[in-house]
Amino acid sequence: MTEITDKNDNSSRAQFILYWGDMGTQWGVNRSVAQIHALLYLSTDPLNAEQISEELGIARSNVSNSLKELVGWRLILRVPVAGDRREHFVAETDVWEMALLIARGRKEREIDPAIRAIDMCVTQAETETKLDPAVLSRMHAMQDFLATADKWSNQMLSVPKSNLSALMKMGTKVLTLLRVGGGKTD
């Protein structure tokens, strides 16, 4: 069971945790992992695994595995609590830092392996004499797209958070700056 134990709790906090769990599944994240992340994100005090298990109604073993995953993403940290030998956890609460951690993690786990796989396919395709040239052209196009997206991603991940926020808020105004600077906008 991966639901908040008090089924009558319609508070905004409980709804946030439930919705975050649902959104997580749409992003390919286990519901329990997403709900634990939401709970820790909203918690003002560090929580231990037993507290998390009780609050969310999730099996202790599931909580342990989910905590390991969240620690691996660096979205939560283990923190000591005076007088308590159990591990306690807190979440990163800066939403921009959280977004950057997720973007870096997804790039490492998903984009980088895809780039390596496509590069291997292109290398092999270039040696195959019977391959239709259109197929090789399409593979090159995908390889070029991934290389461009990777370069852009690396640049965006290095932009200071305050500048990144301002850049995102600009939206399509960036196109106006490109036009003024003589760049292409299509």
Image (cartoon, rainbow, N blue to C red):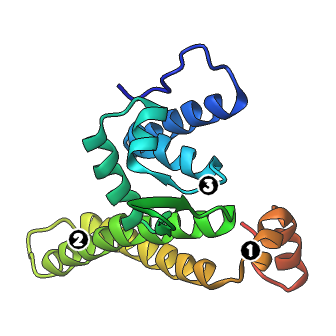
Packing grade of label 3 (10 A; few <14, some 14-19, many >=20) is few
Q: CA distance from mark 3 to mark 1?
A: 29 Å
* Residue type for callout 2: Ala
Residue at position x 60%, y 13% from top? 8
Residue 62: give its label: none
Q: Residue at x 41, y 29 (%)?
A: 57
In space, the residues marked 2 and 1 are separated at their CA atoms by 30 Å
Position of 66 with respect to 80 (left or right) is left
In the image, which disc is placed on residue 164?
Answer: 1
Please state which of residues 93 and 55 is positioned toward the viewer in this rendering.
55
Image point (8%, 69%), residue name: 130
- In percent of width and height, residue 88 lies at 45, 59
Disc 2 marks which residue?
117
Q: Nearer the viewer, residue 62 or 147?
A: 62
**SS class, disc 1:** helix
**Image quadrant assignment for residue 172:** bottom right
Q: Kindly identify the amino acid type of the residue bearing the numbered disc 3.
A: Asp
Image point (68%, 66%), residue name = 96
What distance separates the C-alpha of mark 2 from that of mark 3? 43 Å
Q: Nearer the viewer, mark 3 or mark 1?
A: 3
Residue linked to disc 3: 45
Q: Position of residue 79 (x, y in %)?
A: 49, 68
Q: Earlier in the sequence, mark 2 or mark 1?
A: 2
The total of numbered circles placed on residues is 3
In the picture, measured across the screen, residue 107 lies left or right of residue 14, that is left
The label nearer to you, 2 versus 1, is: 1
Which label's residue is closer to the chain start, 2 or 3?
3
